[in-house]
Image (cartoon, rainbow, N blue to C red):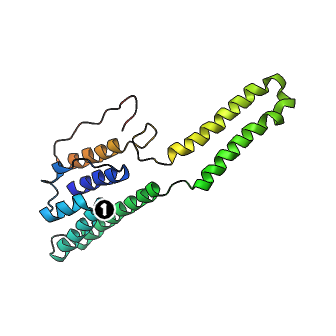
Amino acid sequence: MYRVMLFCYLLRDRLRHQAQDIQHFQNYVNLSDMQWQQCAEHINAPQYLLEIIQKDLILFYKQGQISDIIYSTLTRHTVAMGDIHAGCDRIMTTPLPFSYSVLLHRAVYSFCLILPFSIEASFGIWTPVIVALIAYLFLGLDALSAELEEPFGLQENDLPLNSIVRNIEREMLSSLGAEIPPVLSSYKGNLS
C-alpha cells in the first residue's frame, strides 16, 4: 500500500514536471538501495515502480505467499494504475493542434467582426451592447480552451493533484491504522 501511495506521488510529480522529496517513503516501500536509486533517476519513475510491484506479485505467487485469486485481483489493480498513468501521460503530451487553435481564433474574430453588420437592422442602437456581450462570451470560450489544454499544472483552473494525492494517502493510511496527515487547505479558495 505504501508503494501505491508512492506511485501517486511519482505520477503527480511526472504530470507537473516537478520533483518533490519522497524520501519519507524509503523506510516503508521495501525497495533495495539499487531499486530506490533507479526509481529516483528513472525517466518514467511511476512505470518503473509498477514494474517492481508486478515482479514482486509474481514472486509472491510463485512462492505461495498469495493465492491465485489475490494475485489476479492485485494484478488487475496494478494494470488499472498503469492504464491511468498512460491516459494521464497521453493528456499531458498531446497538445491542442496548432492548426485547430489558429482556426478557432480566426473563426471567433471573424464572427465577432461580421456580427454587428448582421444584427444591426434588428437591434438598432442596442447592436454594440449585444455584440459586446456575444464577443465576450466567444472570446471567453477561446481563452478557456487554452486554459484546459494543460490540466495538470499549478494554475487556479488546473486539477488539484496535491489534494487528490493527499486524499489517497489519507484513505490508505487509515486502512493501515497509521497516523493520518491533515487535509490540505485551500489557498485563495483553490486546492493545489
Q: Image point 57% across, 56% down: which residue?
A: 97
Which residue is rendered at x = 34% and y = 66% of the image?
79
Residue 85 higher or lower than 169, as above or below: below
Quarter residue 31 falls in? bottom left
The x, y position of residue 129, in whole percent, is 73, 25
Left or right of 104, for residue 157: left
Relative to residue 93, is residue 190 depicted above or below?
above
Q: Vertically, is 191 above or below 34?
A: above
Residue 95 image position (x, y, % from top left):
51, 55
Q: Position of residue 137 (x, y in %)?
A: 65, 35
Q: Which residue is mark 1?
A: 43
Image-based side of 108 in relation to 38, left or right: right
Q: Is 71 rendered above or below residue 21?
A: below
Residue 135 shows in the view: yes
* Quarter that holds the C terminus: top left
Front position in the image: 82 or 67: 82
Quadrant housing the N terminus: bottom left
The quarter holding residue 32 reads bottom left
